[in-house]
């Protein structure tokens, strides 16, 4: 690989710069609003945990995290499990309209999300799904499923077709081949797809806010209440922002082995 | 060669239904609005292509479009090479790989309105680390006053926020390259550059295609972050297309022109993505010769 002398400093400098704004957010979350808006301090001079206390003691705050996690998890499972067979079909077969269909899928990501607001509101009201986890999970599939199909197709196309054929000759049935041999070979792709589905659904605000009111209200929507007529509650917003990173960091920690470990060399 | 098999449609069907269910209806609504003047809940006048003509002649829109193109192309020019570079420097396995993966992904996980808010403080010359630091270095920097500073701040924020996406895609793509390729290269005595140019880059083609298309379309629709950070100002230095659209749709409640604008907006993105997609596919197959 690239020489160690060069790669490690480059990576370290990048990480350092990339963590600076996050450090700043953490720093802000431990300050009082008066300190945030008056002076530049590298570390809070009056360290306070009040912002975090406000979130953890108020159910209307912490319930937001739970709501978000539920619909994001639903969306992640739906998107990846629908996309897997479709991506396999796109990578292995040609069929009527395949190229057009493949590109059309991605065009669903090309519309500004604001365009979906009014129609989705009407659609989900008619179906009686307003303010449910299912509504948000389904709505977010509009941008996550195409993404998942595209990423997975890319990884599947990298696997030579001979592997499929060898497995059939060895007497594997299709489902057994798919789960036992094929999926492990593209697990870095599955890991990264799952993470992206999580991420895009987790940070989405417009649709999630429009489709929920009380029971399924996501944390991103609850956060907007730190902006009020009385001014901005910077510290509280920074604390809420810091906490939103935690579930995602856990997700990537769990899928890291799928992404990091090399090609499964099983039967090549 | 792929086998021709129309039964593959059954594997696609669930995805098709799920996406079409959510995608067709909004599109029809927009088309409907774009050719009508909505005066009230029951009063509508068919106006044909009037809204399209009005939108296409709008000078402010042209300004926003050029700013948007400049921004999106800068985003691609910086984030794609940087993303590949960082992915190449990351260790392949072990705890160092896990640590760098988690740390690199962190900016992606912050909700976009928070990203804008944090940078709003972070960039201030009196109370923010970035603005304070730059000014202490003797460079006059003020993102709320100077157009160029504001534009650069939005760009740097986007690079910070979204380069991790390119890094993660490339990293996963690199990990999917079988070791046999590297062994063959070692036997041939290939240089580091040759390994990158003839093994890694071609194998990264499909993930890079996704990265380029995603970054292009998402940066073309960027809204929340610049809106929170600069509000489109100073002047209209950072008013990009989607913000202009929102001003029309929500601020002035011109649903007809806003819908026509949305359709034109969509077609512009579609056109660019189509060109990029075909270009990258051709480049990729050229490599294989």
Image: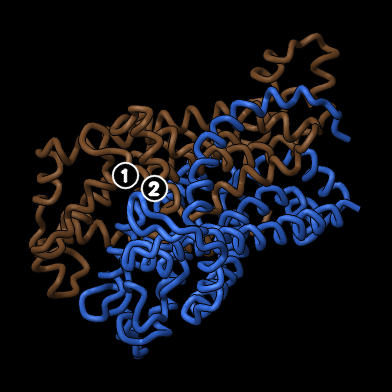
Q: Is residue A7 at all visible to an observer of this figure?
A: no
Labelled pair 2, 1 in contact (Cβ < 8 Å): yes
Secondary element at tag 2: helix
Q: In the image, is B274 to the left or to the right of B171?
A: right
For disc 2, the chain is A
In the rendered image of this protein, which colour is used for chain A? brown
- Whole-percent x, y for residue B119 in the image: 32, 67
Report the side of B153 relative to B73 (left or right): left
Asked if A38 appears above or below B186 in the picture, the reply is: below
Q: Chain of mark 1?
A: A
Q: Which residue is mark 1?
A: A210
Relative to A141, does residue A48 appear above or below in the rendering? below
Residue that numbered label 2 is attached to: A117
The answer to whether residue B221 is seen in the rendering is yes
The first of marks 2 and 1 along the sequence is 2
Q: Is residue A86 left or right of residue B242?
A: right
Q: Image point 69% across, 41% down: which residue?
A: A102
- Seen at 55% across and 41% down, the residue is B24
The picture places residue B175, in percent across and down from the top left corner, at: 65, 42
Residue occupying the point 64% across, 19% down:
A179
Which quadrant: the N terminus of chain B?
A: top right
Q: Nearer the viewer, residue A30 or A16?
A: A30
Place of residue B94 in the rendered image (x, y in percent of width and height, measured from the top left): 53, 40
Q: Nearer the viewer, residue B85 or B180?
A: B85
Chain B drawing hue: blue
> Marks 2 and 1, how far apart in space?
7 Å
To the question of a shared chain for discs 2 and 1, the answer is: yes
């Amino acid at each position: 690989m690239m020489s160690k002398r060069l790669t490690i400093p480059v990576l370290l400098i990048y990480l350092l710069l990339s963590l600076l704004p996050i450090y700043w957010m953490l720093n802000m979350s431990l300050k009082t609003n008066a300190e945030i808006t008056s002076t530049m301090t590298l570390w809070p001079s009056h360290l306070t945990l009040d912002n975090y206390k406000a979130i953890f003691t108020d159910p209307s705050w912490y319930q937001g995290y739970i709501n978000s996690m539920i619909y994001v998890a639903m969306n992640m499972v739906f998107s990846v499990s629908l996309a897997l067979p479709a991506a396999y079909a796109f990578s292995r077969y040609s069929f009527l309209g395949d190229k057009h269909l493949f590109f059309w899928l991605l065009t669903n990501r090309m519309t500004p999300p604001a365009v979906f607001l009014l129609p989705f509101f009407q659609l989900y009201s008619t179906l009686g799904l307003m303010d449910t986890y299912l509504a948000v999970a389904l709505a977010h599939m509009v941008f996550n499923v195409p993404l998942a199909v595209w990423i997975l197709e890319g990884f599947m196309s990298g696997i030579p077709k001979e592997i499929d054929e060898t497995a059939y000759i060895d007497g594997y049935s299709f489902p057994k081949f798919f789960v036992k041999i094929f999926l492990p070979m593209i697990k870095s792709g599955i890991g990264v797809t799952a993470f992206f589905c999580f991420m895009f659904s987790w940070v989405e605000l417009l649709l999630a806010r429009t489709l929920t009111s009380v029971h399924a209200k996501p944390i991103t929507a609850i956060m907007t209440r730190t902006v009020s007529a009385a001014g901005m509650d910077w510290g509280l917003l920074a604390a809420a922002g810091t906490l939103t990173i935690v579930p995602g960091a856990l997700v990537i920690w769990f899928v890291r082995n799928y992404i990091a470990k090399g090609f499964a060399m099983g039967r090549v | 060669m792929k086998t021709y098999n129309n039964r593959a449609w059954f594997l696609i069907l669930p995805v098709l239904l799920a996406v079409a269910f959510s995608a067709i209806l909004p599109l029809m609504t927009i088309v409907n609005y774009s050719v009508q003047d909505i005066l009230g809940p029951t009063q509508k006048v068919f106006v044909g292509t009037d809204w399209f003509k009005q939108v296409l002649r709008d000078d402010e829109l042209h300004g926003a479009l050029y700013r948007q193109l400049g921004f999106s192309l800068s985003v691609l020019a910086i984030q794609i090479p940087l993303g590949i570079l960082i992915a190449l420097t990351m260790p392949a396995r072990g705890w160092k790989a896990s640590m760098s993966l988690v740390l690199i992904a962190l900016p992606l996980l912050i909700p976009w309105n928070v990203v804008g808010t944090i940078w709003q403080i972070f960039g201030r010359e009196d109370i923010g680390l970035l603005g304070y630091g730059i000014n202490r270095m003797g460079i006059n920097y003020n993102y709320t006053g100077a157009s160029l500073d504001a534009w650069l701040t939005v760009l740097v924020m986007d690079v910070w926020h979204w380069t991790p996406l390119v890094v993660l895609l490339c990293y996963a793509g690199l990990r999917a390259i079988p070791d046999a390729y590297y062994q063959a290269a070692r036997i041939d005595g290939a240089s580091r550059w040759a390994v990158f140019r003839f093994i890694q880059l071609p194998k990264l083609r499909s993930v890079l295609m996704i990265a380029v298309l995603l970054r292009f379309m998402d940066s073309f629709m960027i809204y929340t972050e610049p809106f929170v950070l600069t509000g489109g100002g100073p002047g209209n230095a950072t008013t990009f297309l989607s913000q202009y659209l929102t001003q029309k749709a929500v601020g002035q409640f011109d649903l007809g022109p806003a819908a026509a604008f949305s359709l034109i907006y969509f077609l512009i993105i579609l056109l660019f993505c189509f060109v990029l997609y075909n270009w990258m596919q051709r480049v990729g197959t050229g490599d294989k010769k």
